[in-house]
């Protein structure tokens, strides 16, 4: 193990837990069928980025971004300025 790999791994674990928490809040704010299409989610500098399993799911999710932004922001206790939705290729 190289010097510094311990702190790097700890930082990655912390980031992974934070992203999982955001994904949980996103899924809770969505209808169950749409929530199952969410592959990843994270917040960086006020922007919520949501990865979904396909283009059709991304299109459906885009219809409700304003209410989703507000609901997730309130449940996390933060101000979300914008939402970015991206398609995540299978296995990525």
Image: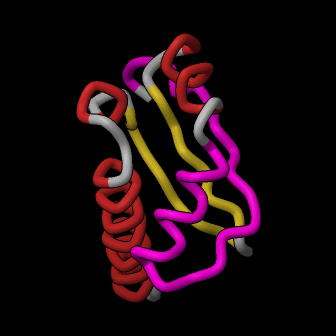
Residue 5, located in which quarter of the rendered image?
A: bottom left
* Residue 2 seen anywhere in this rendered image of the structure: no
Q: Is residue 16 left or right of residue 62?
A: left
Q: Residue at the location (62% across, 58% down)?
A: 48
Q: Is residue 72 above or below residue 88?
A: below
- Residue 88 is a magenta residue: yes
30 sits to left or right of 32: right
Compared to residue 85, the image places residue 92 above or below, namely above
Magenta span includes 64: no
Please tell me which residue is depicted at 53% across the width and 52% down the height of the picture: 68
Q: Position of residue 25 (x, y in %)?
A: 35, 61
The span picked out in magenta is 65-91
Q: How many marks?
A: 0
Q: Give the answer, above or below, for where 11 lies relative to 53.
A: below
The residue sitting at the top extreme is 56
Task: Please state if 81 lies on the left or on the right of 18 as rendered.
Answer: right
Name the residue furthest front.
Answer: 67
Please, which colouring scheme is shown?
secondary structure
Q: Position of residue 43 (x, y in %)?
A: 58, 66
Identify the image quadrant of residue 31. Answer: top left
Answer whether residue 55 is visible to the viewer in this image.
yes
Q: Position of residue 88 (x, y in %)?
A: 52, 27
Looking at the picture, does residue 4 appear above or below residue 60? Answer: below
* Quadrant of image for the C terminus: top left
The one nearer the camera, 36 or 90, is 36
The residue shown at (32%, 68%) is 21
Residue pictured at 43% horizontal, 45% vertical: 40
42 vs 80, nearest the viewer: 80
The quarter of the picture where the N terminus appears is bottom left
């Amino acid at each position: 193990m190289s010097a510094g790999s311990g702190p790097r791994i700890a930082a990655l674990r912390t980031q992974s837990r934070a992203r999982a928490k955001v994904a949980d809040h996103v899924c809770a704010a969505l209808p169950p069928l749409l929530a199952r299409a969410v592959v990843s989610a994270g917040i960086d500098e006020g922007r919520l980025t949501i990865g979904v399993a396909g283009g059709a799911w991304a299109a459906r999710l885009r219809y409700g971004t304003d209410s989703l932004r507000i609901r997730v922001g309130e449940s996390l206790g933060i101000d979300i300025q914008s939402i970015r939705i991206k398609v995540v290729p299978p296995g990525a």
